[in-house]
Amino acid sequence: MNEGACAVESREGKRAPAHRSSDRPLPAPASAKPRQRSEDQPSKDSACAPVAEEPVAAAAMEPAEQLSELVSAEGRNRKAVLCQRCGSRVLQPGTALFSRRQLFLPSMRKKPALSDGSNPEGDLLQEHWLVEDMFIFENVGFTKDVGNIKFLVCADCEIGPIGWHCLDDKNSFYVALERVSHE
């Protein structure tokens, strides 16, 4: 697996590849609804186990002015999520949960360039929409596997990545707020 393709940053600020078996999930906040354990979910030692994932209520976010326009009191998206390039609708309002999890996404480009496995430049992004079922998306495509990761792209113009999906966890699709627009 390409280590640069899916690196995460710990709370201590150390950057590490997401596939290290020593990564352990952080305890969920008391307000978070616990997920049922199933064979579809990764184990604690999985390559995609969350390192710093925190579903956050709208009142706890910063800067509150900007995020309160996008996130409801229940932590869901208030507005539709659109592709920044072509305006195609990716998610309907109310279909995704706001989540803070540090994920490395390669720089935006066309789909064929994303799946070549090269060591890309990119951004460490923290604010995401979490979607728990791939059929909730209105318009999204997936790259070929890059290790155990698939990147999410706009299905119309194929620009991306706009998000990230680990093949070890069938119920977690992340769309970066910085990579999409809202209406």
Image (tube, helix red, strand yellow):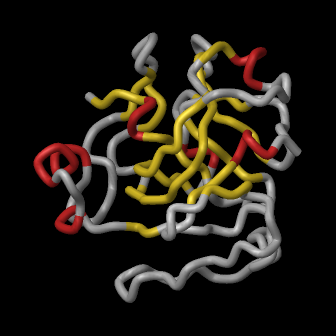
Q: 38 left or right of 121?
A: right
Residue 35 position, x and y percent, is 58, 79
85 shown above or below 38: above
Between 109 and 68, the residue placed more toward the observer is 109
Query: Which quadrant is the N terminus positioned in?
Result: top right
Q: Is residue 24 left or right of residue 163?
A: right
Does 119 appear above or below 103? Answer: above
Residue at point 75%, 16% (across, down): 113
Image spot of residue 92 (x, y percent) = 39, 38
**Rendered residue at 82%/26% (across/down):** 118
Q: Residue at x 62, y 44 (%)?
A: 135
- Tell whether 103 sits left or right of 118: left
Q: Position of residue 98 (x, y in %)?
A: 38, 56
Name the residue furthest bottom: 30
Write the residue at 62% across / 68% down. 50
Quarter of the rendering containing residue 46: bottom right
Q: Horizontal and vertical percent for residue 43?
A: 78, 77
Quadrant placement of the C terminus: top left
Nearer to the camera, 92 or 103: 103
